[in-house]
Image (cartoon, rainbow, N blue to C red):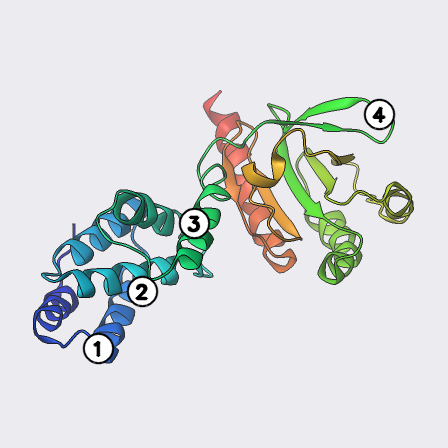
Amino acid sequence: MRKLFPVITLLLLSWTLAAQDYAQLDSLMGVYVTSIQREETESKTAETDYMIGAARDSLTRQHIALWLFDYYKASPLMGEEAVAIHIYDNWFAAGKTAFRSEFEEMDAKLFADFNRSSLLGMQAPVVTLRKPCGGKLTVPRPGRTALLWFYDTSCSKCTLEAKVLPGVLDGETRIPLDFYAVYSGQDKAAWKAFRRSFKLKNRNIKLIHLWDPEVESDYLRLYGVISTPRLYMVESRGSITGRRLEVENLPQMLSLAEQIESLYNNVK
């Protein structure tokens, strides 16, 4: 566990600042969380616990906890949401500190509940969805690398991604891969029209259209589909290797998937 100068300085400030004057404290925390960005999630959670727990008064402890929770909740770095969920569970849900309002608490609980099942490195939730013909399919299938793309035909960003995805996937995918296009809406006609227009030519990719209009599978919560689009990558043994992916990240992620599969094949 790293206890570097920024943390010591931060703690000295937390002991001496007035409760209303946290600007310098926030600045120091910003510097420090940036300095540990390359650390493993376990190290980051340990450091946040140390920083929060070292504050001597309840208002400063609350401020540090809220600042760190908000930072990791909104972090663009894939995987850091796990730190925010740890802070929520260990400090707020456990009653060691509190949110400023009921609305803030409800929003944080929603974030934690809709992200805790699909964190980086976890086994991907297995859900049973409906096929266009009315049959059911349980996904992701074991033994196959998978992309799960949750979209809505009324979502403008989804429409844009649908135009770009075929070009990226057809050009970059060199391993067998299942692409699950999961429609999150309920308009059957719109879904049918989308299926007709969305095609993939790469023979390595199996395109599978699915939906769950009654949300019987609870996929919205399990995969954190609060809004669309949402894109996940799952390696062949079921571990989540990419979440909250953007289309521009796919070439790099597909290259990583190739390396993972090559490693598994060499171990066998």
Question: Which amino acid type is marked by label 3?
Answer: Gly
Task: Please state the horizontal and vertical placement of residue 119, each as a whole percent of the image.
Answer: 46, 41
Q: Which residue is mark 1?
A: 20
Q: Which residue is mark 4?
A: 134
Disc 1 vs disc 4: which is toward the camera?
1
- Secondary structure under tag 3 reads loop
Q: Which residue is mark 2?
A: 67
Out of 240 and 236, give the one closest to the viewer: 240
Task: Please state the horizontal and vertical placement of residue 75, each as a whole percent of the image.
Answer: 43, 61
Disc 1 vs disc 2: which is toward the camera?
1
Q: Which residue is mark 3?
A: 79
Question: Which amino acid type is marked by label 1?
Answer: Gln
Q: Earlier in the sequence, mark 4 or mark 2?
A: 2
- Contact (Cβ within 8 Å) of mark 1 with mark 4: no
- Contact (Cβ within 8 Å) of mark 3 with mark 2: no
Separation (CA) of disc 1 from disc 2:
14 Å
Q: Is residue 150 left or right of residue 244?
A: right
Q: Earlier in the sequence, mark 4 or mark 3?
A: 3
Residue at the front extreme of this rendering: 102
Q: Earlier in the sequence, mark 1 or mark 4?
A: 1
Q: Is residue 124 left or right of residue 216?
A: left
Q: Would residue 17 be seen by someone viewing this image from the given angle?
A: yes
Disc 1 vs disc 3: which is toward the camera?
1
Out of 149 and 225, give the one closest to the viewer: 225
